[in-house]
Amino acid sequence: MTPKKKLIEVALPLEAINKAAAREKSIRHGHPSTLHLWWARRPLAAARAVIFAQMVDDPSAHPDLFQTEREQKKERGRLFKIIEDLVQWENTTNEEVLQKARDAIWESWRRACAENADHPRARELFNREVLPAFHDPFAGGGALPLEAQRLGLESYASDLNPVAVLINKAMIEIPPRFAGKPPVNPDVKKKADLAGRVWQGAQGLAEDVRFYGQWMRDEAEKRIGHLYPKVEVTAEMVKERPDLKPYLGQRLTVIAWLWARTVKSPNPAFANVDVPLASTFMLSTKAGKEAYVEPVIEAGSYRFTVRVGKPKDAEGAKNGTKLARGANFKCLMSDAPMAGDYIKAEGRAGRMGARLMAIVAEGTRGRVYLAPTKEHEAAALNAQPSWKPDTSLPADMRSHWTPPYGLATYGDLFTDRQLVALTTFSDLVGEAIARIKRDAIAAGLPDDGQPLAKVGAGGTAYAEAVGVYLGMCVSRQTNRSATLNFWDMKGENVQQVFGRGRQVFCVRGAERLVHGGGRRLRRTAAAVGKSV
């Protein structure tokens, strides 16, 4: 057996591959990365190009077919054109483009089979009707096995991390099992644009993810909506802030509540005051839309108010109560310094609290920043979770920065309101699976009781399959529903916990509206559905 040179060993259209891979970073809708967070994802364009170039022979490997250098260059150009089309995001599901690539792979494979027909294990290793399988034992985010499957290879993926295994199952294993099946939700027969439609690939499965994700959102609002009140713009607010006049009397949907962690003042004169650890008082640094928190000290305590426009003390607003790099702050009441060791000791002693600094609401032309109210602070503090994770966090400062501050368990990373919301959504996944099973059986899927893990294809397995994606929706919500989330002053949104690949201690946390006024989970389910 004489190995033939593959295209990847000779040349690649690197410029086209790099350009497509770079562009892919800005694509979210329909991209597998929207299924679940995973680090070091490989660009699909690069994965597709590399697998193709590994499978097809370079023309120089066949001098009998391409006798001159000119003929070889021409054939190489044809293969380059296939790759240049293949890496374009718009062609990810373009069957015409994909089929050209598959045909080229089959062509090279059948040549290899013919040349190795006298191999003692030819029937097993060089079957001209079966392409070699693709194996990835460290599949991670699944880009390589997914693209191998797209190019016609049978893919096998595994990983030590169970999250990676779930991602790969959701991308590679589950969709083909229910390919071509219509959705089972009851809306299909009611909506004219869905009834009688031909459902290709995993379109039916994706439609059910969207439908039951919306059902979960609606149910969650019924159960926990009271914990997320709207904010009313009163005449008193308008008197202090004339810019709020267009919203007078309106009840605005809150996007986020911005909190500051607190510790007891180190100054004996204010020992009973919980002073804020505010890394900044700025809320928005967008040009023309600046907003900031202004602390007001009165009657031996303090309150927060919100101002719009550029602050008079720009440096003070930028720094908040922070003195220097790391956990070094000053007491708002006395300017006494608070070193990191003092703050950590307060946290471990259970004396670290939180104070609402500002409310971010949805306006007609952008964000509206409002001062905190007693109603909104009480809504968060009165939540009563029925369960709290008590698993200890790893004592590893490379990835988990919170234990030295007294946040030693996973439950400590969430507010009580966040725990109530996430527990509610988790419970709703189980309820949704039961509902989907009933609807699937009513739609004609067999009631065989075979679960997804047993390679079932009936009502039980289908319900569990949709449940996998709904569970991923909740997991994605968790990444933006913890006390480690922070407010992006430029983008004016809540940033995810794992934006930096580790759990960073956050003194100014942003708590967002979990059920999203009809949009958060619906958008997440729609994104997951599209990527399916």
Image: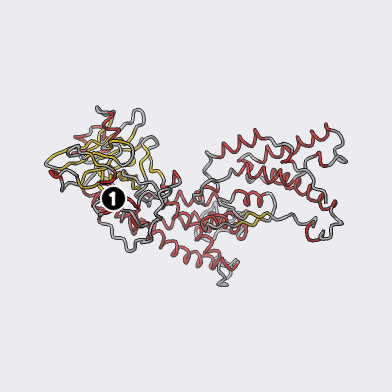
Residue assigned mark 1: 229
The location of residue 312, given as percent across then percent down, is 24, 27
| Mark 1: amino acid | Pro
> Residue at position x 13%, y 39% from top?
298
Q: Depth check: give the residue in front, 452 or 261.
A: 261
The location of residue 200, given as percent across then percent down, is 62, 53
Tell me if residue 519 can be seen: no
Tell me if residue 452 can be seen: yes
Residue found at the far bottom of this picture:
448
- Here the colouring is secondary structure
- Count of numbered circles on the image: 1
Other residues around mark 1 within 10 Å, as few (<14) / some (14–19) / many (≥20): some
Q: Depth check: give the residue in front, 57 or 286.
A: 57
The location of residue 270, given as percent across then percent down, is 15, 44
Element at badge 1?
Answer: loop
Q: Is residue 163 above or below residue 320?
A: below
Q: Where, by quadrant of the figure, is residue 225 drawn?
A: bottom left
Q: Where, by quadrant of the figure, is residue 197 drawn?
A: bottom right
Horizontally, residue 449 falls left or right of residue 55, namely left
> Residue at position x 29%, y 34% from top?
319
Q: Where, by quadrant of the figure, is residue 219 drawn?
A: bottom left
The location of residue 153, given as percent across then percent down, is 69, 53
> Residue at position x 19%, y 45% from top?
265
Q: Is residue 67 above or below residue 441?
A: above
